[in-house]
Image (spheres, rainbow, N blue to C red):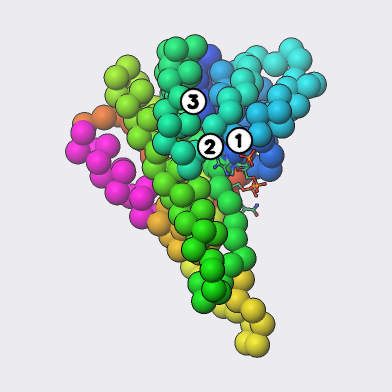
């Protein structure tokens, strides 16, 4: 893997939802492989904390405060990346939220909208900015959408138990469809940009070779 990651050395990666979990792990790993990583999340301090201990690595980890559900915040973050490092070569769309609110719950509109904004809109806003940057510089960029098995199937609830699916599987199904739609747009636009949907975080490094 070390060898195949060489093509990304010195290139710029944007990783969303990088303050904890899968996003933090992917961001740190890409920096260790020599990428200039711009790690985005609302909690910038949590990303700063990840930098402790990252000494003598080939790349770098930069913390950028960004709310992917907010268009202005996304634009500001990508403008900062462009001004500071020239643009983005690799986008890992990882940031997201989970809900246990049932569709049939009362007064759940805010929580449901939150899922749509964070899981679907946020992904599309970041992709739009990344494509703009990649197209302008005519680079063979790559966009990876972190998905889930729930992007392909809906779990069967145990009869009598509260179903736990809610809007998470529909949002992840949307990510599967959005990825395919954008793939077709990128072909139509005759770009060299790739877009991939990854169902498991460990697959990230299998798809960007
Ligand atoms: N964990 C699993 O078992 C699993 C399995 C399959 C797929 N996935 C997918 O993998 C991804 C990451 O999962 P995870 O378990 O690592 O999640 P997590 O631990 O809950 O972390 C979510 C990350 O997303 C960020 N985030 C949430 N809303 C954001 C926003 N509006 N703007 C910017 N960042 C935002 C959070 O940072 P801030 O709060 O600081 O903004 C946090 O860093 C998700 O897309 C998830 O659906 C997870």
x 70%, y 16%: residue: 57
Ligand 1 neighbours mark 1 (CB distance < 8 Å): yes
x 29%, y 19%: residue: 136
Work out whether residue 75 or residue 57 is closer to the camera in this orientation and state it. Answer: 75
x 80%, y 21%: residue: 53
Ligand 1 neighbours mark 2 (CB distance < 8 Å): yes
**In the figure, is residue 115 to the left or right of 33?**
left
Q: Which residue is mark 3?
A: 77
| Residue 100 seen anywhere in this rendered image of the structure | yes
Give the crowd class for mark 2: few <14, some 14-19, many >=20 residues within 10 Å: many
Residue 83 pos. (x, y %): 44, 12
Work out whether residue 65 or residue 207 is closer to the camera in this orientation and state it. Answer: 65
Residue lying at the far front in this picture: please name it.
107
Q: Which residue is mark 1?
A: 42
Give the crowd class for mark 3: few <14, some 14-19, many >=20 residues within 10 Å: many
Q: Which residue is mark 2?
A: 67
Range of the magenta residues? Answer: 176-189
């Amino acid at each position: 893997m070390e060898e195949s990651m060489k093509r990304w050395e010195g290139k710029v990666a944007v990783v969303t939802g990088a303050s904890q979990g899968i996003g933090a792990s992917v961001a740190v790993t890409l920096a260790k492989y020599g990428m200039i990583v711009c790690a985005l999340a609302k909690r910038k301090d949590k990303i700063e904390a990840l930098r402790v201990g990252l000494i003598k690595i080939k790349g770098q980890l930069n913390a950028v405060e960004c709310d992917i559900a907010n268009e202005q915040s996304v634009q500001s973050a990508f403008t900062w990346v462009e001004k500071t490092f020239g643009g983005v070569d690799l986008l890992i769309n990882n940031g997201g939220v989970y809900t246990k609110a049932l569709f049939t719950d009362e007064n759940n509109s805010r929580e449901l909208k939150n899922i749509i904004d964070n899981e679907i809109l946020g992904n599309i806003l970041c992709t739009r900015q990344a494509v703009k940057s990649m197209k302008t510089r005519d680079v063979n960029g790559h966009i990876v959408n972190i998905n889930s098995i729930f992007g392909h199937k809906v779990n069967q609830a145990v009869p009598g138990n509260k179903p736990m699916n809610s809007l998470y599987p529909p949002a992840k199904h949307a990510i599967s469809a959005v990825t395919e739609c954008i793939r077709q747009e990128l072909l139509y636009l005759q770009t060299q940009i790739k877009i991939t949907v990854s169902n498991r975080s460990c697959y990230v490094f299998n798809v960007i070779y």
